[in-house]
Image: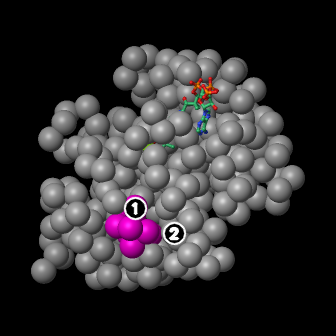
């Protein structure tokens, strides 16, 4: 049967804004995080401590966390941040962050393009990063990207994803988020991948799903994962991320679309949908373009 409640891991400020062409002022980012928290999102991933040349949209990450701490006190340190390596982790430690996420790739091509490393080399980079983070008492999440398809390598074999995913978990991460980075996955593939992880000894309780909506399958995929037993769902307020006018990439599953489906199923999320829609409508104004979310379009006043 379905659970009484699930956890939504909000990634709009990080995965959403990292892909928007507009540069959002740091004050607006802090307000965005605060409004998402106020709307009831239990986890709001705030930013990334990566090289600013690789992701200029998040070049203000130190400043953002400082601002959040100034405005929210200790709670400002609770928001997860992405760190690819020890340099990024040190920045997070210096600011007192308590939750970090590493992000690996299931494919060689994307590992090179995203991290300038091979699949094996990315592990060598993550290993000391996770060891140090755990020694600092931090919680560590791991992402694995290109779990379904890769734009250069095509369909990604399930066994390859399970192998890399297990390696990341074995470093000591508490949870593995399975990323459909380019949004090509379908519900049957989701079920097959989750079955393969379970067969390899990784239960759904250690897994999260992270869908992008390029082919309009993200909600169906989330439903398949929910029915399978997954209880943590990544989503991005308003479906932020990737320009809908560019053909290559679209945003994550919109948090509003996910909440609408879950509440319809009687699965609690703690999210106040009206407050969330108001937040996404406000952010759409900041970005100067409408939200691609159907639920936002339907509910916005
Ligand atoms: P590199 O060029 O190989 O780095 O990049 P390096 O280790 O050779 O160091 C080069 C210079 O960068 C050095 O400076 C380092 O100090 C500096 P120099 O000595 O030359 O002056 N440096 C840093 N500076 C600031 N912060 C750091 C940092 N690290 C090194 N953390 C690196 C390797 C990993 C740094 C680079 O490839 C990078 O930053 N990549 C980030 C890419 C990224 O953020 N992608 C988006 C997130 S992944 C995603 O969105 C997918 C996800 O949503 C799930 C899904 O959808 O599938 C999670
Ligand atoms: Mg993503």
Give yes or no for residue 28 being in the magenta stretch.
yes
Whether disc 2's CB lies below 8 Å from ligand 1 is answered no
Label disc, if present, on residue 26 of the rendered structure: 1
Give yes or no for residue 208 being in the magenta stretch.
no
Which corner quadrant of the image does residue 111 belong to? top right
Q: At 51% across and 59% down in the image, what residue appears?
A: 63
Extent of the magenta region? 26-33
- Name above or below for residue 122 compared with residue 213: above
Label disc, if present, on residue 212 of the rendered structure: none
Q: At 53% across and 48% down in the image, what residue appears?
A: 48
- Residue 198 makes an appearance in the image: no
Precedes in sequence: disc 1 or disc 2: 1
Q: Which residue is mark 2?
A: 67
- Name above or below for residue 162 compared with residue 94: above
Q: Position of residue 64 (x, y in %)?
A: 49, 61
- Name above or below for residue 273 compared with residue 210: below
Q: Main secondary structure of the magenta part?
A: helix
Q: Position of residue 132 (x, y in %)?
A: 82, 46
Q: Position of residue 200 (x, y in %)?
A: 73, 37
Ligand 1 resides in the quarter of the picture at top right
Q: Nearer the viewer, residue 137 or 155?
A: 137
Taking the view exactly as shown, the residue that stands out farthest to the right is 135
Q: Is residue 243 left or right of residue 2?
A: left
């Amino acid at each position: 049967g379905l659970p009484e409640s699930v956890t939504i891991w909000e990634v709009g400020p990080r995965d959403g804004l990292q892909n928007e062409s507009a540069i959002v002022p740091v004050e607006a980012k802090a307000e965005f995080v605060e409004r998402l928290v106020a709307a009831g999102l239990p986890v709001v991933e705030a930013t990334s401590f990566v090289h600013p040349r690789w992701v200029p949209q998040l070049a203000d990450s130190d400043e953002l966390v400082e601002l959040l701490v100034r405005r929210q006190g200790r709670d400002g340190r609770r928001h997860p941040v992405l760190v690819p390596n020890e340099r990024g982790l040190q920045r997070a430690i210096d600011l007192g962050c308590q939750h970090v996420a590493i992000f690996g790739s299931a494919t060689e091509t994307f590992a090179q393009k995203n991290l300038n490393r091979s699949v094996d080399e990315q592990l060598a980079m993550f290993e000391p990063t996770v060891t140090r983070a755990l020694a600092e008492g931090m919680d560590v999440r791991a992402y694995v990207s290109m779990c379904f398809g890769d734009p250069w390598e095509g369909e990604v074999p399930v066994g390859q994803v399970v192998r890399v995913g297990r390696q990341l978990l074995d470093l000591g991460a508490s949870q593995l988020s399975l990323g459909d980075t380019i949004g090509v996955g379908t519900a049957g593939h989701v079920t097959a991948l989750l079955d393969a992880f379970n067969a390899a000894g990784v239960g759904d309780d250690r897994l999260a799903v992270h869908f992008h909506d390029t082919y309009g399958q993200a909600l169906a995929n989330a439903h398949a994962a929910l029915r399978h037993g997954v209880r943590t769902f990544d989503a991005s307020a308003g479906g932020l991320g990737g320009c809908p006018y560019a053909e290559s990439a679209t945003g994550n599953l919109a948090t509003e679309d996910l909440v609408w489906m879950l509440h319809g199923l009687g699965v609690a999320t703690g999210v106040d949908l009206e407050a969330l829609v108001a937040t996404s409508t406000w952010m759409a104004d900041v970005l100067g373009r409408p939200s691609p979310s159907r639920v936002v379009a339907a509910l916005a006043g």
